[in-house]
Amino acid sequence: MSEQIHPLAPHHLPFYLAPPNGTDVWMVAMGIFLVVTILYVGNLYWKLHSLPERMAHKSEKLQFEIVAILGLISLFTHIHAFWVAGLLLALIDIPDFGTPLRSIAGSVEKIADASDVGASPAGNSGEPPRLSTAGKPDLTVSDAPKQEVQGHA
């Protein structure tokens, strides 16, 4: 075989072509660029995908767990409706009905405990006070001082 170039072949090759026995620098650069771009786009995808969960966690929403589950479902099923539902749920403030109801229940329990203690003194057997002919309760000697203290308050 001869080392001569074919007469129809160009005698000067462009700079972007690799020499026959050397390293293709442009291919290596594009490979590195491709890996960096894939990592960057993947990181951007993860940040965007976890946006509803981060929003719900930052604002300490009650529905944080539901938003997180919707994000996982959308990640594994690729159904974007779950992600949109999680985003909307992270943006909405669901009113907290539990705390006021627990407060009301605790107050009612305290009232019930206080009325049970005050309703049955040692001398009374749990019977309601007897009414006199004037429609007022009949006061016994032990009840009279209590009535006076209540009247002054």
Image: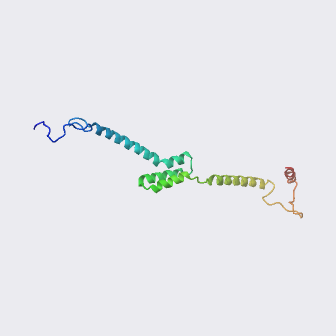
The residue drawn where x is 45% and y is 51% is 72
Image-based side of 11 in relation to 93, left or right? left
**Number of callouts in the render?**
0
Report the residue that reaches farthest toward the bottom.
Answer: 133
Q: Residue at x 46, y 45 (%)?
A: 47
Q: Position of residue 19 (x, y in %)?
A: 22, 36
Query: For residue 12, what is the image quadrant?
Result: top left
Pick the residue in front: 41 or 129: 41
Q: Is residue 36 left or right of residue 60?
A: left
The x, y position of residue 42, in whole percent, is 40, 45
Asked whether residue 66 appears in the rendered view, the answer is: no
**Quick check: can you spot residue 75?**
yes
Determine the residue positioned at 53% across, 54% down: 88
Q: Quadrant of the N terminus?
A: top left
Whether residue 42 sits left or right of residue 115 in the image: it is left
x and y percentages locating residue 49 in the rendered image: 46, 49
User: Which colour scheme appears in the figure?
Assistant: rainbow
Residue at the limit of the structure toward the right, as seen here: 134
Q: Compare residues 86 and 145 and report the one nearer the observer.
A: 86
> Residue 100: where, in percent of width, then height?
65, 53
Residue placed furthest toward the top: 22
Residue at 49% across, 54% down: 84
Looking at the image, which residue sits at the far left?
Answer: 1
Decide which of 85, 129 is in the foreground and name it.
85
Q: Nearer the viewer, residue 18 or 145?
A: 18
